[in-house]
Amino acid sequence: MKKKIAMLPGDGIGVEVAEAAAIVLKAIEQQFGHAFEMEIGLIGGSAIDDSGNPLPEETLKLCRESDAIFLGAVGGPKWDSNPVGLRPETGLLGLRKTLNLFANIRPVKTYSSLAACSPLKHEVLQNVDMVIVRELTGGLYFGKPSERGGRPGEEDVVDTLYYKRSDMQRLIKAAFDLASVRGGHVTSVDKANVLESSRMWREVAEETADIFKDIPLNHMLVDHAAMRIISSPSSFDVLVTENMFGDILSDEAAMVTGSLGMLPSASFSEQGLHMYEPVHGSAPDIAGENLANPIGAILSAAMMLRHSFSMEEEAAAIENAVEQVLKSGVRTRDLAGGGETYLTTSEMTKEIVNALGDDFAIHQ
Ligand code: NAD
Ligand code: IPM
Ligand code: MN
């Protein structure tokens, strides 16, 4: 099958993990006889340095002409004091908004071979298989009336949280659809004891549950949810929440698995052009050192194969290869627990590609 992929490496370790994902996609291409045309586009800090625009028109055009988008990560200290229009994150937020990528799916799965890497107790990690469904194009990130906040004066500042009921409806429906496929349940996370937007969120969740009669729904306040993710992560199935809460809870949930570098994500639009990116950022503290864990990015590529190209077997091959490699005991530094022996980003990628070959040979 022929597919065009917009590759947007971004900044910092985004470049390193996007390279890793591209290597794995090339291996899949060869083994399964596909043709992936991967074209690189600039976004974030690298785009600012190139053209003064964190989201160049050329990059948007590339994305629109592609069958799927892969993004590494954006940001870094070099651009941290830039005005809002010249921030790397503005490029990413602009891309999400422009392409209507409203449903961000962040699966959180523990590997038994990584139990010792998690800061949590072994027994707490059993049977963790949850998915965070995060609203991605609204809320505090895109406040109105002052777009993305503002400073009315020297001594005050405003960031507003704005949602349309229809934004909540489509996102919460996506969460229930997912729970139906998984045969699971939905936990809707909000702050309804304080925020009016959360009270509307609850209403919409209730209305949606009335349609999906077989899917149990419970509500949880976000502070309680933060506690519960640590104390009993296996009690969650599909967790649905607004943009900012989802951002914070997903980094927390990542650590249940052992490292933020493990988590993949997919961002779905209604139009059919979707984006895939690891949950982590550009990690300036380790950027350029070949130390990043590429697994979140590689699993994001697997999600792309499954959801954008309907290549279930190919996606499963990548996921199995990751599992095999982790079982064999090799680790990147983030998972090595202070141990001296760990693999670089490129070595880990090679291990996964090799395991892919083994897996492929077995299935022939
Ligand atoms: P971060 O996610 O970049 O890093 C947090 C910590 O986790 C760091 O110690 C880092 O070394 C570690 N880490 C993250 N990914 C890792 C990986 N794959 N392997 C090993 N260790 C990993 O968060 P931050 O430091 O708060 O933010 C840095 C920059 O990244 C900021 O500019 C921020 O805006 C940006 N950011 C971008 C995205 C994105 O592009 N989607 C996501 C989050 C943060
Ligand atoms: C993420 C990141 C982004 C977000 C930043 C870089 C804008 O943290 O993808 O989780 O907050 O959405
Ligand atoms: Mn985040």
Image (cartoon, grey):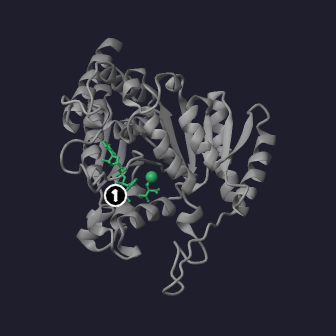
Examine the rendering and report whether any part of residue 309 can be seen.
no
In the image, 311: left or right of 362? right
In which quadrant is the C terminus drawn? top left
Whole-percent x, y for residue 78 in the image: 26, 67
Whole-percent x, y for residue 265 in the image: 46, 43
**Could you say which quadrant of the image residue 1 lies in?**
top left
Label 1 residue SS: loop
Question: Which residue is found at the position 32% from the left and 18% from the top?
Answer: 359
In the image, 155: left or right of 118? right
Whole-percent x, y for residue 14 in the image: 30, 50
Question: Which residue is found at the position 55% from the left and 56% from the top?
Answer: 244
In the image, 39: left or right of 94? left
**Could you say which quadrant of the image residue 263 lies in?**
top left
The answer to whether residue 303 is above or below residue 123 is below
- Residue that badge 1 annotates: 74
| 22, 325: nearer the viewer | 325
Examine the rendering and report whether any part of residue 348 can be seen.
yes
Q: Furthest-bottom residue in view? A: 153
Q: Is mark 1 within 8 Å of ligand 1?
A: yes
> Label 1: few (<14), some or many (≥20) within 10 Å?
many
**Could you say which quadrant of the image residue 132 lies in?**
top right
Q: Amino acid at mark 1?
A: Val
In the image, 113: left or right of 235? left
| 206, 211: nearer the viewer | 206
The answer to whether residue 287 is above or below residue 83 is above
The answer to whether residue 175 is above or below residue 98 is above
Whole-percent x, y for residue 345 in the image: 23, 38
| 225, 275: nearer the viewer | 225
Question: Which residue is found at the position 60% from the left and 71% from the top?
Answer: 160
| 263, 42: nearer the viewer | 263
